[in-house]
Amino acid sequence: MTSDSLLERARRLWADLAGTPVAFTESAIEVVTSPQSLLCPPGWVGIVALGRAAIATAPDNATAEIVRHALSDLPATTVVDPAAVRGRLPVAETLGPATLAYCDAAGFRPAQSGAVEAIPADHPDMAALLARVPAEDAGESGLADITSPAFVVRTGPDVIAAAGYHAWPRRTAHLSVLTAPAARGRELGRIVAAAAVTHALNAGLLPQWRARPEASRRVAQALGFHELGSQLSINLTPADSTTQRS
């Protein structure tokens, strides 16, 4: 699969997640009204840029028009830049941007290790790992939501690194990876992630890696993931959400 094929599959996925018909075009950001959008939390504006095109969802028509008018002349790489968006819109909060990266069998660079064990996602040792790490790390990893087996490395009886994926639409495998803080710097994240990616590819799925921390992005790149775009969610200031900044 070429990077163009990966890009097309990624765009179809995120267009579906928008919850209403929308298309990535090379001219300007496509903004649609979709209260049920999965691009962002409810009531927020979600923006996804892939390649040189971007889409956005807004919770109502008035907000959609404001976003369209404010961002229509910006390139795709800029509409997911929080500083640039804050210069155009009254932003109260942001989530992201998170880099979106994808992998295929041809480009995958596995990390070999005989230490990886597959256990059920709801295994008590997974709950124990999530309880031992900072709550922010546990939430960021998304490991509590995986639908695949969990691929783990242990020290003694304790799981110190784990990975898996959540089955998303369009036969997409959304990767989740977590390493206990004391075990970081030993490439354990790459080892368990490689096992999860292998499982996804063998099932005919498209592995997706969404990351904000630079360390997570480096792991994805080492495994052969291509960074194709970014996702940004913005919450507009309620009092000013119907007034564009000048």
Image: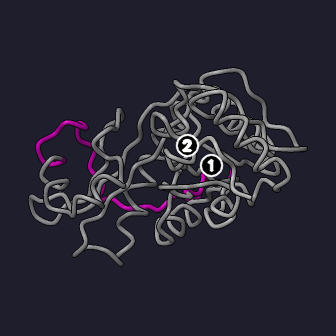
Residue beneath disc 1: 102
Residue beneath disc 2: 207
Range of the magenta residues?
Answer: 98-126
Q: Residues within 10 Å of mark 1 (few under 14, many from 20)?
A: many
Q: Position of residue 49 (x, y in %)?
A: 71, 48
Quarter of the figure with residue 149: top left
In contact (CB < 8 Å): disc 1 and disc 2: yes
219 up-or-down from 163: above or below: below
Residue drawn at point x = 58 percent, y = 41 percent: 45
**What secondary structure characterizes most of the magenta part?**
loop
Front-lying residue, 237 or 24: 237
Q: Residue furthest bottom?
A: 185
Circle 1: residue type: Tyr
Front-lying residue, 24 or 153: 24
Q: Is residue 98 left or right of residue 78?
A: left
Q: Is residue 195 left or right of residue 243?
A: left
Q: Residues within 10 Å of mark 2 (few under 14, many from 20)?
A: many
Q: Position of residue 113 (x, y in %)?
A: 37, 61
